[in-house]
Image (spheres, rainbow, N blue to C red):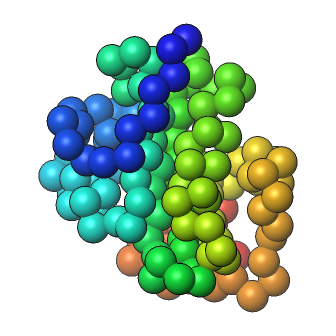
């Protein structure tokens, strides 16, 4: 694998973004919605194996002391090879000094614990589709 990290939204095949998210079982939207979300983020990461998009992630932030990480996804055949770790580290390095909140899929906690994330006792959320998010295990 020839891992290449890209930190901007130029020349992205936006159709591949929802395809990757769908493949890993995460929520996804039309490609133009993801394009807008990534372009409006403080930092973005796209991981490639040569020219093949294999992973992605982004963070929204004030750029000073708070950041939230979203949409960390790596194609299954590349998981366990350090790609997800590289994406998260790249995001965290670009926002050095910030506290990080993380929005992750249920079942991925062990991966993030290895990167020093800890469960919060006070995290709360309001979702547009409460029943669906309860079914998926995101909220009680």
Of the pair 2 and 54, the residue shown nearer to us: 2
Image quadrant where one finds the C terminus: bottom right
Is 110 positioned to the left or the right of 65 in the image? right
Is 104 positioned to the left or the right of 62 in the image? right
Q: Is residue 134 above or below residue 70?
A: below
Q: Residue at x 82, y 67 (%)?
A: 118
The x, y position of residue 84, in whole percent, is 61, 38
Of the pair 72 and 18, the residue shown nearer to us: 72
Confirm whether residue 107 shows in the render: no
Confirm whether residue 12 shows in the render: yes
Q: Is residue 66 above or below residue 100?
A: below
Of the pair 139 and 44, the residue shown nearer to us: 44
Image quadrant where one finds the N terminus: top right
Of the pair 133 and 28, the residue shown nearer to us: 28
Extreme residue toward the top, this view:
1
The x, y position of residue 50, in whole percent, is 40, 15
Q: Residue at x 82, y 58 (%)?
A: 116
Is 16 positioned to the left or the right of 100 in the image? left
Q: Residue at x 45, y 34 (%)?
A: 5
Q: Is residue 114 above or below residue 102?
A: above
Number of callouts in the render? 0
Q: Is residue 8 above or below residue 135?
A: above
Q: Residue at x 71, y 26 (%)?
A: 80
């Amino acid at each position: 694998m020839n891992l290449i990290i890209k930190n901007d939204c130029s020349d992205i095949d936006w159709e591949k973004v929802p395809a990757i998210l769908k493949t890993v079982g995460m929520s996804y939207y039309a490609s133009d919605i993801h394009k807008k979300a990534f372009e409006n983020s403080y930092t973005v990461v796209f991981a490639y194996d040569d020219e093949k998009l294999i992973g992605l992630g982004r963070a929204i932030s004030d750029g000073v002391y708070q950041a939230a990480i979203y949409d960390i996804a790596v194609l299954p055949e590349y998981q366990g090879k350090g790609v997800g770790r590289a994406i998260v580290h790249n995001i965290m390095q670009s926002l050095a000094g910030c506290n990080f909140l993380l929005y992750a899929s249920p079942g991925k906690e062990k991966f993030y614990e290895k990167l020093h994330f800890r469960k919060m006792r006070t995290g709360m959320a309001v979702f547009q589709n409460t029943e669906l998010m309860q079914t998926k295990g995101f909220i009680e």
